[in-house]
Image: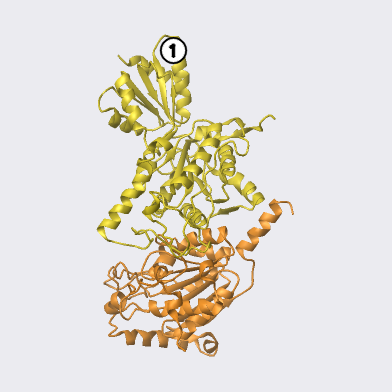
Amino acid sequence: MAFDYDKYLRPGKLPHIWCPGCGHGIAMKGLIRAIDTCGLDKSNTAIVSGIGCASRLPGYVDFNTLHTAHGRAAAFATGVKMAKPEMNVIVVGGDGDGTAIGGNHFIHACRRNIDMTYVIFNNFIYGMTGGQFSPCTPTGHKASTTVYGNPDPVFDISKLAIGAGASFVARTTAFHATQIDKLIAEGIKHKGLSVIEVLDDCPTTYGRRNKFRSVIEMMERLKTMAVPVAAASKMTAEQLEGKVLTGVLHKEEKPEYCEQYAEVIKRAKGA
Amino acid sequence: MAKKVALLQGNEACAQGALYAGCNFFGGYPITPSTEVAEVLSVELPKIGGKFIQMEDEIAAMASIIGGALAGSKALTATSGPGMSLKQELLGYACIAEVPCVIINVMRGGPSTGMPTGPGQSDVQQAKWGTHGDHPVIALVPASCQEIFTETVRAFNLAEKYRMPVQVLYDEIIGHMRERIEFPEPGELEIINRTEPSVGPEEYKPFDPSFGDVPPMAAFGSGYRFHVTGLNKAADGFPTTKADLVDNEQRRQLRKISAAQSDIELNEEYMTEDAEVVVFAYGSTSRSARYAVNELRKEGVKAGMFRPITLWPFPEKRIAELGKQAKAIIVAELNLGQMNLEVERCVKGACDVPFIGRVDGEPINPGQIMDKVKEVK
């Protein structure tokens, strides 16, 4: 039987704002399947976003949804989670939202290892504003503000998350649709801050300027650049040039923030 | 039974007032001269199962209290000028998304880093105009440690009642000064909590104007699933660009305050009945003004003081009346001209509005005020 997405979608809120060929819809469907897999109660789940194309996702789904200000999703979500640790809190957003204007909130959410799941849709560009370069736009590539080629080095979001202290970090792509929900589900089940980076495509503002002739070509790129972690261990540095690792990149058990704060409460009460 | 009394610093009184009001969430970031509010609450909140979190920056602190408030908490943050500048972004978010919360601004000089350990009253127009767009504003300006306690309680009440952020501004002098505080008994001061929905989740709309200008507010996780956004929104909470809906929503939000001015406005008038010269002063400056008025009365000068305790919304009507009664309303404040503009606007030329401003890190002293009163012809 086909999966019933309608159970989680708000009636009357589609069509979404995403362009034809955008991978965000694939990622959203993956998120919904993951939530279903984990059996999360809709009323006990908050989905929090910032600003940008990906950040419009919460409006379409039937949960406690919070569309905040640019870059601030993780900080708002931290407030929700601290106030009600029993709630499932999922953050969604793009690469610019999460790692440029929201970079500070992102790394500190990772550092606290607060039990939330951050799904970051990395489409290598600021899509909503018309294709300006983000911290994830490949060096040399073109954006509306880098017509001569992007001079900036790139953030590796997953490495950033691991370095900042997130206890579960995984990466996949919009091409690998069935892996998206598996990794998000694993992230939701993991106690602590989970980051799932979904490499994505923006045909309208990134593909067009960088000589991708079709969405299929962009998906092919995602397919060929992805190398599963296990396969990578058998490859040479030369073979890994220009590739990105996919799958679970990091997983560790360490103290979770709300549990740590519950201990603070116990100590304050003199127990 | 005798009341519990204590010698408390203004910032400590603020924290105690917040606890009395039912505050159970604090998100903050260290900044002089407000830090003691955070320090006290970091000790006291966990004792009652409340939450204290020190966030990564001022913006995040503001974000955390909005998130906490949406999840049902009574939330507070405290800061000073540079932090208040950073919080403006999400102060606007709390306005448009109609999230009750309280922001303490212990004012120092400025702009920028200014004089972190010196007093200022130069954020009073920022309180009204700092965040972009049209939005309702409530700002309270207590003048003593006891009043910081009661006004912090009132700030929570107004935030909950009108479903919006409320700012409390006091200067570094009273923030760091110690005075005797009488703790009100539990139940002695009214405590207001937000109105919860009277309809079921299926019918609930988070901004339904059929329930009045302040629609009931559900909490995340309570079974009411709704959408919150910083975009202009319709009654159901979802974004809209429909002209009539946007216009209605924006006007309703301003009406929450304009229609409730008499409930929100609070002033103290001191010897204004027959005053020929009125000193308009708030916060620590009003303490010098009171002293000056007492001295001038001994000399037979008919001086009085008007002290706003609610600064925004501004006491327009009363200032206009005093403008007709007095020869002059002297505005004294620790800035180079802010609330005098508002007084001038309200008196409409009916009297003179001489100004005393000071930004050198020292308080305005009574002698300065007395000299200015004597200059009035």
| Displayed quadrant of residue A73 | bottom left
Task: Assess disc 1: are there few (<14), some (14-19) or many (≥20) residues with their C-alpha within 10 Å of its C-alpha.
Answer: some
> Where is mark 1, residue-wise?
B297
Q: Is residue A131 above or below residue A179?
A: above
Q: Which chain is yellow?
A: B
Q: Is residue B60 above or below residue A184?
A: above
> Residue B176, how many percent across, how many down?
55, 35
| Mark 1, secondary structure of its residue | helix
| Displayed quadrant of residue B355 | top left
> Residue B131, how many percent across, how many down?
36, 48
Q: Is residue B365 visible in this depiction of the protein?
A: no
Colour logic: by chain
Judging depth in this view, the residue of B171 and A8 nearest the camera is A8
Q: Is residue B171 left or right of residue B23?
A: left
Q: Which chain is orange?
A: A
Q: Which quadrant: the N terminus of chain B?
A: top right
> Residue B195, how many percent across, how many down?
48, 50
Q: Which quadrant: the C terminus of chain B?
A: top left
Judging depth in this view, the residue of B275 and A263 nearest the camera is B275
Disc 1 residue type? Arg
Total count of labels = 1
Please name the residue shown 51% across and 70% down the image.
Answer: A42
Please name the residue shown 49% across and 41% down the image.
Answer: B155
The chain that hosts pointer 1 is: B
Q: Is residue B2 visible in this depiction of the protein?
A: yes
Please name the residue shown 49% across and 64% down the image.
Answer: A106
